[in-house]
Image (spheres, helix red, strand yellow):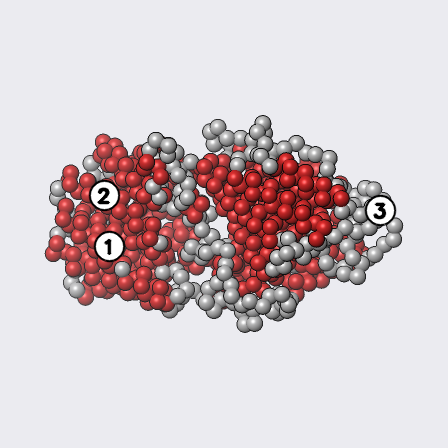
Amino acid sequence: MDRGVAALRGIRDRVVGSDPGLNRLRMALSAALAMATTLGIEYLYATATHAGPQGTLIAMLLGTVMAMMGSMALSGTGVWPKVRTAVFFPPAIGIGMLAGVAVAGRTDLMLCVFVAVMFVAVFVRRFGMAFFFYGFMIWMGYFFAAFLGAKLSMLPALLSAVAVATGWVLLLSLTVLRTNPRRTLRRVREAFGARARAVARASAELLAADPRRHARLRRRLHARQLRLSEAALMIEGWSAEPGALPVGWSGPALRRRLLEAHLAIDALAAAAETLAEDGGELLPAAARIAGHLGRREYGAVEYVARPLLEPRTGTAAPGTGRWPAHHLAAAAVEYVTLAGTATAPPPYDDITDEAYDPVVTLAQGNLPGSAAVASDVAARGSHWNPLSRLTLTTRQAIQVAVAGTLAILAGRELSQARYYWAVLAAFIAFAGTATRSETSIKAVNRVVGTLVGLGAGIGLAHLTAGHTGWVLVVIVTSMSLGFYLVNVSYACMIFFVTIMVSQLYSVLHEFSAGLLLLRLEETALGAAIGIAVAYFILPTSTRDTVESARRAYFRALADLLDRAAPTRPDGTGLDALARSLDHRLQQLTLVARPLTRPMTWGVNSRLVRHRLTLYAATTRQARALVRSGFPVPPELADTCTALSRTATALAESTPRPDHPVPGVTQALTTAGTTLLTHRPHCPGTPLPPITQPLVHLRQLLTELAMLPPTPTTPPTPKTPAPTNQPTKSPR
């Protein structure tokens, strides 16, 4: 293949894989188009109604804010859900404006009501995603009215501007910005393929690298495997959207096909790790196979893999890496075969029920955040403080009210006019976060983004001074880039927000370096207050949230192992349980991410990362168990039952090195004894395909239970793949 074509394919894979479904790009472009066009619509409306220079500016600012929030709130696929959501935009912001008008000019009362509005804005989030935006609109309406000193007579004009912006954004969301679920699902599937090839490239790098780099490259390989699982979960969620599935496909069939492809990539990565550790003369050939797969050179994959798949008599000499290379080649060929039939509906005989219940529900096209886990976690101090047992949204509303009060008091000591920057920093710190570590990290990122954005903001403000057109271009571009990067780095988003704020103050003729420095000081003050409140007022512990996610993970694992028994031959149900386990792993990894940072106080970050690796390996083996030997042979049913009891016991208790969980040791011993009892006595006799994942699951659960390894586990069988099925990867 031409190197230029290969390079372009590699770039496309990286872009597509980094943004499944192009969701971030779509959100950024939608926000840019909505804000830019709303600016023009509001200008024309204000001019037609003779609003004057100040009224025109206010209408344009208010319309832009509505366009920004509306483009996010109306990002779904259904028509009527969008209409129902948009109808309440004007009432939500009108409630805030009415409260702001009622207290305008009375500073003390205005500040007290400001705190109450912040409480309400967070409290209403419990009613669903739409109320997240309604709450923010109530807050924004109050801010506009109270700090602008609006009069009751101004409300009709302000609400008219809001209604115009709402109608326009709704029209855009139903026409040019409407999400096509089938096209989006196709793009997410393309992202799955791109991430699968990224795993192959990481495997090739591991095979070709110096042994001194193996530890770092293994971590990269495991990280890419987790990203592949996330793409599979996004496909799971998008498959439930009406009209998303291709013609002839069903949700269970697509889930099954993805599981097969996922397992092939897992097998390739596992073989690459084994081969990199053992070495051997076939290592360069295996690296070429993985490299060709990573570059989407599927014909070359089959050509290079063919010699490694040819049946050979006798036993491979030690140190040749024969069997790991054989397994890698088989897995690569299997993935190529599946990729070649990706558009054809698979004829699965055991999938007859067309009903589809996804294991994950997406939030604005993305996987749900940590609040889905932390919602059932009580705050610290629940044994003496009854408020700690309130729901997460209520606790956060109290936290925001306390943080807002402190930010007002402290912020006014810095500036009587600009203290709202401190309030905003404290308020935003609790948006989209659930645990105190997440809140702290977000607050710090806000300060860092503001600090770095000061220089760029000052420089661009001088360049665009006096050029209104360029100011608007910079504002829209900055917000678009901020939207695109918000899920990658919150600090980057705030960097662009700071640039946007600099442009706004330039238009208002209030720009100065001292003003931006004051914004930094107020932001740092509000962030510090937000961190303090998150840690000391009804704190949601990160460790408690991780513990909740860990228990949910083991319960999902127990369900899968229990269903794998031969008395329940439900392949479709097992597929769903495998994906449910992937979802639990994704949640566990998400909430534990703050604990993987070396700066976290009182936490062994290296141990946390190691245990997350064990959970990921357990998930891969459980996934292999689903497809490797269904149904489970009756003689191994006791092994599944014993491992299920182990997972249940681990879900009910926290393992400690010096205090083993009751029942775990006995259950693991039973599993090991069963595996040994039904081990073939004749050398060279192949084991049932299901044996290997069961062996690995027992080993992994032993380590996760913090028990010393026991000699009851049989060695991993090194048997060749069936010679009459060279494209079937070993599981």
Residue 276: assigned label: none
In the image shown, does 226 or 485 lie closer to the viewer?
226
Q: Distance between the residues labelled 2 and 1?
A: 15 Å
Q: How far apart are marks 3 and 2 (CA)?
A: 76 Å
Location of the N terminus by quadrant is: bottom right
Q: Name the residue under label 3.
A: 683
Mark 3: secondary structure = loop
Residue 93: assigned label: 1
In the image shown, does 412 or 77 lie closer to the viewer?
77
Q: Position of residue 711 (x, y in %)?
A: 73, 35
CB-based contact (under 8 Å), mark 2 and mark 1: no
What's the residue type where badge 1 is placed?
Ile
The quarter holding residue 724 reads bottom right
What's the residue type where badge 2 is placed?
Ala
User: Eyeballing the image, is 273 above or below 62?
Assistant: above
The answer to which of marks 3 and 2 sits earlier in the sequence is: 2
Q: Looking at the image, is mark 3 or mark 2 nearer the viewer? A: 3
